[in-house]
Amino acid sequence: NAGVTQTPKFRVLKTGQSMTLLCAQDMNHEYMYWYRQDPGMGLRLIHYSVGEGTTAKGEVPDGYNVSRLKKQNFLLGLESAAPSQTSVYFCASSVVGVEEQYFGPGTRLTVT
Amino acid sequence: SQQGEEDPQALSIQEGENATMNCSYKTSINNLQWYRQNSGRGLVHLILIRSNEREKHSGRLRVTLDTSKKSSSLLITASRAADTASYFCATDVGNQFYFGTGTSLTVIP
């Protein structure tokens, strides 16, 4: 039982490049979330999903897209990376929306 | 705008002492959660308190919730060096969670 895993752990992108971050959970959770964490800002919700095939915008969705084609996977895409997207990205999942969230280890992304 | 704000931003105590951190939020909530984050790691859930609860205990943790003041406190008793971490409160508005900026706790052996 791996819990929540994230791929990759680290990545450096040049401005304008694209990439996809993968989150996988093996707990059969319905809800999945993508957050970014910046120094002094806490965690901010980017997008979330309440079930397979559904996605919704969070607090800071601009510049990101997501997909939830399979219940266990939640993908976060950056179509044209910008230096402002340099951050640590965390994925989380939960059984239902207002209960305990389980977090992945994070992906550290640097955009130069 | 952020829903939750923790206070203080940083706290340094001696091992064995108690640590108290506070969280204030802006709108009505279903529940409030506290998480811990060790440096460079993901967040770990500590405790959840529902809006109709006033106090909850879990081991050395005690959480209070005052919905009239829109505030919560987390007390860690008999602190240990291993408690050194950042602590965040999280509140839910609909299906979205809002995390505060965190309290950085240092426990000196």
Image (tube, grey):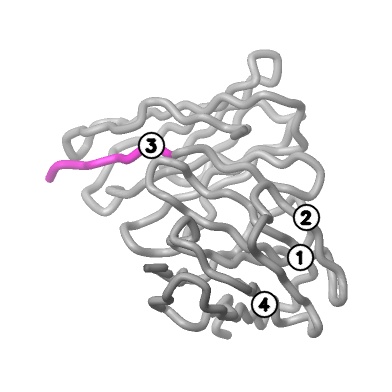
What residue did someone put label 3 on? B103
Subunit of label 3:
B
Residue drawn at x 26%, y 54% as measured from the top left:
B82
Image check: A64 left or right of B64?
right
What residue did someone put label 2 on? A97
Answer above or below: position of B62 versus A3: above
Subunit of label 4:
A
Please identify the dominant SS of the magenta region: strand
Tell me whether the residue at label 1 lies in contact with that at label 2, contact meaning CB atoms closer than 8 angstroms. Answer: yes
What residue did someone put label 4 on? A75
Task: Farthest residue to the right: give it.
Answer: A53
Residue B63 is situated, as x and y percent measured from the top left of the image, at 53, 33
Amino acid of disc 4: Leu
Q: Secondary structure at mark 3?
A: strand
Image check: A109 left or right of A19?
left
Amino acid of disc 3: Thr
Image check: B54 left or right of A70?
left
Q: Quadrant of residue B26?
A: top right
Residue drawn at x 78%, y 65% as measured from the top left:
A49
Region rendered in magenta? B102-109
Q: Nearer the viewer, mark 1 or mark 4?
A: 4
User: In whole angstroms, how far apart are the C-alphas of marks 2 and 4?
Assistant: 19 Å
The crowd level at tag 4 (other Cα within 10 Å; few <14, some 14-19, many 20+) is many
Answer above or below: position of B26 versus A48: above
What residue did someone put label 1 on? A31
Q: Quadrant of residue A47?
A: bottom right
Camera-side residue of A1 and B103: B103
Residue A96 is situated, as x and y percent measured from the top left of the image, at 79, 59
Answer above or below: position of A43 versus B42: above
